[in-house]
Amino acid sequence: MNQNDLALALQEPRHDSPHPHAWLTLAAGHAPRGEVLAHPSPQPVRSSLFVRRLRMDARIGVYDWEKAAPQPLLIDLEFDLASLLACHTDRLGDTVDYAEVVARLRELAVERHYDLVEALAEAMALAVQGEFGVPWLRLTLTKLAPIPGAEVGIVLERGRRA
């Protein structure tokens, strides 16, 4: 791929091209002799970030013994990116900084008491969508010690996938 091909590849897709995602194939370097190839998938292109097995303590629970001390949680979060720009620029400023997302989730877990996993999970989902511009997310919140020998939790999805 020569320098002109790369410059063409990094431009926004032209709507008059045979396939709206053809430029991604060229950008990935898969077009021999500079011709633009159609993306092999007819599906829209999207990228998701995830944070798995995030452990934290939270002020959560209905029972007096749960209210006496923070309770251990496990969070799994997956979210779609609103833009694919960071895939091309390699700049943190062009994506969602997952370290900031994790810090915000930890903050929410201790800033006030929640009785139910449903309420804390909803607060976390709203914060991630609203503060980080995430169009779709799936959040799993697992309470690790509510009942001896068991874990309980909630899985929720918010928004629309591309």
Image (cartoon, rainbow, N blue to C red):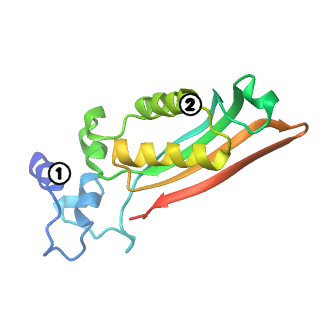
> Residue at horizontal 32%, vertical 41%?
95
**View extreme (top): residue:** 69
Q: Is residue 2 above or below residue 111?
A: below
Q: Secondary structure at mark 2?
A: loop
- Residue at position x 68%, y 41% in the image: 115
| Amino acid type at mark 2 | Arg
Q: Which label was assigned to residue 45?
A: none
- In x, y percent, where is residue 138? 54, 53
Task: Give the labeled residue for mark 1.
Answer: 10
Q: Quadrant of residue 17?
A: bottom left
In front of the other: 89 or 33 = 89
Task: Report the quarter where the C terminus lies.
Answer: bottom left
Q: Residues within 10 Å of mark 1 (few under 14, many from 20)?
A: some
**Residue at the farthest right position:** 149
Return the disc, 2 or 1, that comes first in the chain's sequence. Answer: 1
Type of the residue with mark 1: Leu
In the displayed structure, does residue 149 sit left or right of residue 33? right
Query: Distance between the Cα atoms at labels 2 and 1?
Result: 46 Å
Of the pair 128 and 41, the residue shown nearer to us: 128
Asked if residue 90 is positioned above or below residue 65 in the image, the reply reads: below
Horizontally, residue 155 falls left or right of residue 122, namely right
**Residue at point 25% right, 74% down?**
19
Q: Which mark is residue 112?
A: 2
Spot occupied by residue 126 in the image (x, y as percentages of width and height): 45, 48
Relative image position of residue 15 (x, y in whole percent) = 15, 72
Residue 51: which quarter of the image? top right
Front residue of 85 and 120 = 120
Q: Helix or strand or loop: what does disc 1 sit on?
A: loop
